[in-house]
Amino acid sequence: MSFDLHALLLGSTSFFEDDNYSFVFPIFALYFFYSGNKRNAILALALSVLTLKRIALVGFFIGFFYMLMPANIKNKRVVVVFFALTFNLIYLYASYFITTDYFNELSLYYTNTPAAHFTMGRSAIYSALFDGRSFFDHIFGSGLGKTYYIAADIYNTSIKYNLHSVILKLYYEIGILSLLTFVFFLYKNASKSAIPFVIYFNVLLFTDNVITYFFVMFFYFLVLYCVVKNGDLE
């Protein structure tokens, strides 16, 4: 337990440090809002703040915003898929942008800190993903498991480390074409009632290795099962 307010607001440390619960509570909050149980939804949202993971809260609010959209918009699968592909491409470009000298200059000018420090080391990691790659590497990838070698070089260790992004891992290993195919079917094959939870999951993939957190994935699929069972079965 940590009660450092500065760490809560500016860092990635919460009052109650636990990566599993910080990702699970927002799933419950989305589910209870979806099912109309406002009391439990507010409780789960409060616990989400206490076990703060900023990316988890971002994913929650985007998924919740989708729930509030008019039915004639959110029920159009082509619109959902289009925006999903667009936002994943924007994230890829943003990941590249933070590795540039221009972003480093902006970081120094506005925050008086280098980009590597401002991005908590991610710009240094991501630069290895974009530099010195051929056109075919960008399109078709460099091979499964290759990101482990990049992480090992960065951390100067033989231990296998995951990147802090599943989306970038897929981009580097299987290429942008296969990545967009993955995102396409992630949304296309989801039932309408499951879309807010898929959005939340997709956002988590931007900056974390959530697919390796078995505890989190168990509750994600459990909630999806409950939603699909009690909702539409298309």
Image (tube, rainbow, N blue to C red):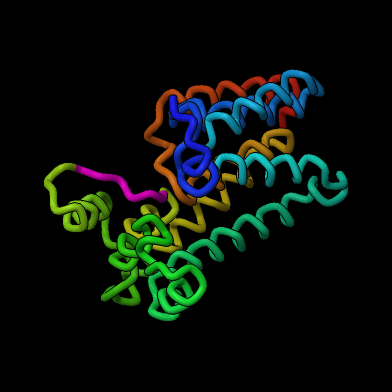
Relative height, residue 155 to residue 99 (above, below): above
The reply, left or right, for residue 98 in relation to residue 203 is left
Task: Give the residues drawn in magenta, as a range.
Answer: 160-165
Q: Residue at x 51, y 58 (%)?
A: 180
Q: Residue at x 72, y 55 (%)?
A: 78
- Out of 69 and 192, give the one closest to the viewer: 69
- Residue 14: image location, x then y, percent: 49, 34
Q: Residue at x 67, y 58 (%)?
A: 83
The reply, left or right, for residue 38 in relation to residue 131 is right
Q: Is residue 120 visible?
A: yes
Looking at the rendered image, the quarter that the N terminus falls into is top left
The reply, left or right, for residue 214 in relation to residue 89 is left
Q: Is residue 217 visible?
A: no
Residue 164 in the magenta stretch? The answer is yes
Looking at the rendered image, the quarter that the C terminus falls into is top right
- Out of 72 and 14, give the one closest to the viewer: 14
The reply, left or right, for residue 187 in relation to residue 230 is left
- Residue 117: image location, x then y, percent: 37, 61
Residue 161 in the magenta stretch? The answer is yes
Rendered image quadrant of residue 154: bottom left
Relative height, residue 153 to residue 8 (above, below): below
- Out of 82 and 149, give the one closest to the viewer: 149
For the stretch drawn in magenta, the main secondary structure is loop
- Residue 212: image location, x then y, percent: 37, 34
